[in-house]
Image (spheres, rainbow, N blue to C red):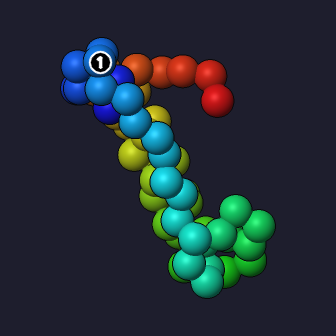
Amino acid sequence: MKTCLPQWISYSLCPVDDETTRRDNWWQHDSGRKRVEAEARKIIEYVKAGVIQDSEI
């Protein structure tokens, strides 16, 4: 969002909170683990391509 939206727009992140992809259990379920791994791969790909800014989290 920082890359594509104007600076004056503020935003917040909204994490998934379903039965298998919560902050406290995503690694315990195959579907949750696959979702998190896929999202991490996408973020890395987009940063490498220069589509989104890399930042410390």
Amino acid on which disc 1 is placed: Trp
Q: Nearer the viewer, residue 23 or 40?
A: 23
Q: Does the rendering let one see residue 49?
A: no
Which quadrant would residue 52 be assigned to in this image?
top left
Q: Which of 13 and 56 is in front in this view?
A: 13
- Quadrant (top left, top right, bottom left, bottom right) of the N terminus: top left
Residue reaching furthest to the top: 7
| Residue at 54%, 21% in the rendered image | 55
- Asked if 55 appears above or below 42 in the picture, the reply is above
Judged left or right of residue 26, residue 39 is left
| Residue at 61%, 83% in the rendered image | 19
Q: Count up the numbered dots.
A: 1
Which quadrant would residue 26 be assigned to in this image?
bottom right
Image location of residue 42, percent across then percent down: 39, 46
Image location of residue 27, percent across then percent down: 71, 69
Judged left or right of residue 38, residue 24 is right
- Asked if 18 appears above or below 36 in the picture, the reply is below
Image location of residue 39, percent across then percent down: 46, 53
Judged left or right of residue 23, residue 46 is left
Q: What element carries label 1?
A: loop
- Asked if 10 appears above or below 40 in the picture, the reply is above
Around disc 1, counting alpha carbons within 10 Å, would you say few (fewer than 14), some (14 to 19), or many (20 or more)? few
| Residue at 23%, 19% in the rendered image | 6
Image location of residue 5, percent across then percent down: 23, 26
Q: Which residue bears the numbered disc 1?
A: 8
- Quadrant (top left, top right, bottom left, bottom right) of the C terminus: top right
Q: Does the rendering let one see residue 40?
A: yes
| Residue at 70%, 62% in the rendered image | 23
